[in-house]
Image: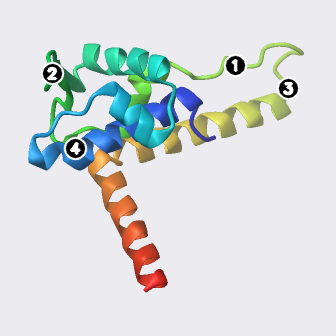
Amino acid sequence: MGFAAKTTYGLLALMELAGVQASGERLQVAEIAARQGIPERYLEQMMASLRRAGLLRSSRGPRGGYQLARPAATITLAEVLDCLEGDTAPATITEGGSSAERQVLQELAASLRQQRLAQLQHTSLAHLLEQRDALQQAQAMYFI
C-alpha cells in the first residue's frame, strides 16, 4: 500500500517547500521539478490542486512562486492524499456472493485502510523533514 506516483511527486514538492518555509522563500515549479526530477507540466497541475485545497499560496512575478499556506507541522499527509488522490477506498467485492471468506477479506481490507488513515493523520510534513534530515545527517557522518 504505497503511494501513487502523483502523490509521491506532490509530497516531494511539499517537502521542498517545507524545507524553505522558515526563510520565507518561494519556489517556482521549474526549480522544484528540476531538483526532484518531476515532469514540470505534471507538477504544475498538482500544485494548482494543492493551492485550491488551501495547502499552498502562490504569487506571480519574477520573485513569485509557491509557499506552504500553513506551518509544515499542521499539514498532515491525510490532507495531501485527500487532495491529490481523493476517495480511493476500493469497492466491496460483491461478485460471487457474500461468503465468509470474502467477508474476512473485506474486514481485513477495512482494518488496513483504517490503520493507514490513522498513520497519515498523525504524520505531518514536518515529521517527514525530520526523518529526511536525520537520514542526511547519518549519511554525512558515514562518509566522514
Seen in the picture, residue 53 relative to 26 is either above or below; the reply is: above
The CA distance from mark 1 to mark 2 is 50 Å
- From the image, which quarter does the N terminus lie in? top right
The CA distance from mark 3 to mark 2 is 62 Å
The disc labelled 1 sits on which kind of residue? Thr
Seen in the picture, residue 126 relative to 76 is either above or below; the reply is: below
The CA distance from mark 1 to mark 3 is 13 Å
The CA distance from mark 4 to mark 2 is 25 Å
Whether residues under marks 1 and 3 lie with C-beta atoms below 8 angstroms apart, the answer is: no
For label 2, the crowd category at 10 Å Cα-Cα, with few meaning under 14, some 14 to 19 and many 20 or more, is few
For label 1, the crowd category at 10 Å Cα-Cα, with few meaning under 14, some 14 to 19 and many 20 or more, is few
- Mark found first going from the N terminus, 1 or 4: 4
The disc placed on residue 92 is 1
Q: Which residue is mark 2?
A: 62
Q: Nearer the viewer, residue 38 or 18?
A: 38
The disc placed on residue 99 is 3
Residue visible at 58% across and 31% down? 4
- From the image, which quarter does the C terminus lie in? bottom left
Residue visible at 43% across and 68% down? 135
The disc labelled 4 sits on which kind of residue? Ala
Residue 132 location, quadrant: bottom left
Q: Position of residue 12 (x, y in %)?
A: 42, 40
Q: Position of residue 82 (x, y in %)?
A: 41, 24
The disc labelled 2 sits on which kind of residue? Pro
Q: Which residue is mark 4?
A: 72
